[in-house]
Image (cartoon, rainbow, N blue to C red):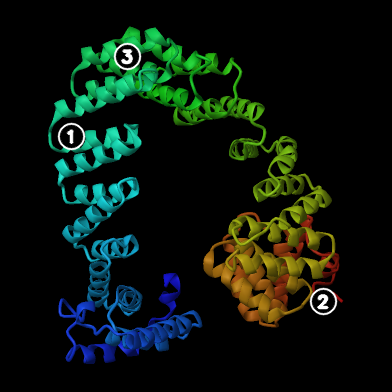
Amino acid sequence: MGHSFRTLASILLFLLVGLMAKAQDAPLATDMPTSSASPDSPQLDRRYAYFFTEAVKQQQAGNYAEAFQLFQHCLDMKPTAEVYFALSSYYAEMDADSQMIQAMEEAARLQPDNNTYLERLGQSYIKAHNLDKAIEVYERLADNNRNRTEVLAILGQLYQYKKDYPRLVSTIERIEVIDGVSEETALAKMQAYSLQGKKDEELNVLKQLVAHHPNDLNYRVMMGNWLMQNERKKEALREYLGVLKAEPDHVSAQLALLDYYRSENMAQETDRLTRQLLLGDKTPMESKTQVMRQFIYDNEMAGGDSTVVLNLFRQMLQRKQTTSDMAELRVAYMDLKHMPKDSICQALNTVLEIAPDNAPARLQLIQQVWPTKDFDRVIELCTPALAYNPDEMAFYYFMGLAHYQKDENDQALDAFRRGVSQINSESNVEIVSDFYAIMGDIYHQKGMDREAFAAYDSCLHWKPDNINCLNNYAYFLSLKKQDLSKAEQMSYRTIKAQPTNATYLDTYAWVLFCQGRYEEARIYIDQTLKNDDAPDGAVLEHAGDIYALTGDIGQAAEYWRQALEKGGGTDLLGEKVKQKKYIEKK
């Protein structure tokens, strides 16, 4: 039946009730009807064949309820293995596990040599956690199929789960008779012997593995490692030295020997072999990284002399590098030791010389450079990154931001637009939000308010609590006296988030002013001035306008005068000071 039955539970569930009712009159366990109880006649055989064929047709047509009833009718007429097998899938779908197992038992009993039935029955026993029965079935399967090692593998797993280690070993040996001795079977037998505490037998298996593969020195290293783990260090040393005599650059043997030297506190030998491995051309980078990490650890435990570590890094990196792994490890070490940023930047440059497409290293270098405000260097670092890593939005972000800091708005906008094209559902929300926020600011500076407001809307779609965007959006709307209710709601969210931020307080006061809520505006402009040690001309002009329309023209004139001295404010500021009255911008 396969996986299609998993969609049929709702269709067949009602049949379970009828099935249970029938069970009162027809036993389902060992008392199920068998073929010996069925009459044998040509007429019955023809009727049975007709209904069985019809059941199969209904099943193939997707009419599972009808097929189930027809199979049950076949069972009443002539219980056969094939009917029990067919019905077992329906019982399984209806979660009638005991009936499913009983049906499979009957199928396997009627056709004891049918491997399909036996395998389904064995799987059913495993699912029901009846491992003893499962073992019986898989032993029968193994007897029927003496070359099927996958059956023996399952049988071995069952014995292992039952902690029947002698039979587990016997089963593994049956696999070896078919496929020969392998590392996998040897290790499995060794584990079984180890769990029984049979060290001699465990070692004998390993010796046999070495004997079966005399040209594979890795097994001799494995032998040495086993001896080391079992405190037979001198014997282990002989194995390692024997391997290295045959193959002086055998990396696994060198690594194992290094562990031996370290365990014996042989500092001179440990240092010599460490450097040999790290500076050797035949040592894989993965092994070098492992050895270097251990060297750093040992160095830290001995007091942490970074000059020794950095000197070894220098020697390694003077050699041709096929990967940037070692250069990256040096950067990580320098970070760990809190070394100067200039040194870390040089180390990161080395990483990029080896692997210019290394995005994490390039981003780390940009983040190191950014606080120095060397925006040309940031742009220089980002430019090749857009070719190597065109889908990494952070590079567009830093490039655009660097141009923006240099007042190169067109170049900044170009970088942000290209970055926006890379946005997908997995993009970093913070970066995407800032993309659109800065684009909105640039559009506003270029007098493209419609595009600016669209960018702000996109920003808030990605991050509704982007406070800077909420403030700028609200303020620019107020300048145009457009959507003031929306502007007030956005601005209010900023002062709720940061109630002492003078910039946000000024925006909120001005939005209230634009709405004609002058007394409320005065409360918030007072809070602005309280929290701003050096208000600029625009803020002071706002204060003057608000005070003027709340009736305090004297204080308003003073704020306008101060604003004029600051050199900020609108074109009408001079007239306000001269006429000592509020003048509305047309």
Depth check, mark 3 against mark 2: the one in front is 3
Residue tagged by mark 2?
584
Q: Residue at x 33, y 32 (%)?
A: 183
Residue 451, horizontal then vertical, whole percent: 80, 67
The first of marks 1 and 2 along the sequence is: 1
Residue tagged by mark 3?
240
Q: Residue at x 70, y 55 (%)?
A: 422
The image quadrant where one finds the N terminus is bottom left
Residue 65, horizontal then vertical, whole percent: 40, 87
The residue sitting at the front extreme is 42
The image quadrant where one finds the C terminus is bottom right
> Label 3 vs label 2: CA separation?
93 Å
Tell me the quarter of the picture where residue 52 sits: bottom left
Residue 465, horizontal then vertical, whole percent: 57, 66
Residue tagged by mark 1?
194
Q: Amino acid at mark 1?
A: Ser
Q: Residue at x 31, y 78 (%)?
A: 91
The kind of secondary structure element at disc 1 is helix
Q: Amino acid at mark 2?
A: Glu
Q: Taking 122 as reference, is 556 above or below it?
A: below
